[in-house]
Image (cartoon, rainbow, N blue to C red):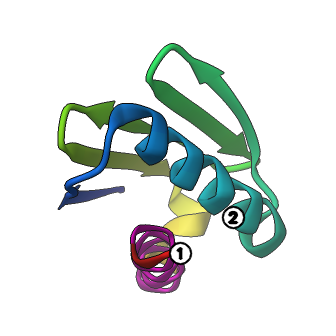
Amino acid sequence: MSIRIERHHGLTIDEARRRVDAMAERLKEDLDVDCRWDQDTLAFERTGASGEICLNGEVIDIRIELSFPLSIMESRIEKVVVERLEQALAD
């Protein structure tokens, strides 16, 4: 099961990275994920889930892969990620 979220933004890459980093801190609390940057991609994982947040120019592209047991929580996980992304972009 996978989740894909894409949002356009009008930020510089440095500002987008700062905001995604703040978002990642919130996701650590909400979803208990471990995060690490590799250039302009923030990879994250936890038991049963992994994904990445890619900064592609003026687009933030989020991809999440869920294991079967976590797939029953797909809508909740997507809701939390979308809320955190929207908060980060509004700051």
Badge 2 or badge 1: first in the primary sequence: 2
Q: Report which residue position mark 2 lands on.
A: 27
Numbered range of the magenta stretch: 75-89
Residue appearing at x 67%, y 57% in the figure: 22
Q: Is residue 29 magenta?
A: no
What is the tally of numbered marks visible in this picture?
Answer: 2
Occupied quadrant, residue 10: bottom left
Q: For the residue carrying disc 1, how many other residues have a C-alpha within 10 Å: few (<14), some (14-19), or many (20+)?
A: many
Residue appearing at x 76%, y 58% in the figure: 25
**Residue 4: horizontal and vertical position, in percent?**
26, 56
**Vertically, is 60 above or below 42?**
below
Q: Quadrant of the N terminus?
A: bottom left
Q: Nearer the viewer, residue 77 or 89?
A: 89
**Residue 60: horizontal and vertical position, in percent?**
29, 47
Left or right relative to 60: residue 76: right
Q: Amino acid at mark 1?
A: Arg
Residue appearing at x 73%, y 68% in the figure: 26
Q: Mark 2–mark 1 contact, CB under 8 Å?
A: yes
Numbered circle sitting on residue 84 = 1
Q: Secondary structure at mark 2?
A: helix
Q: Amino acid at mark 2?
A: Leu
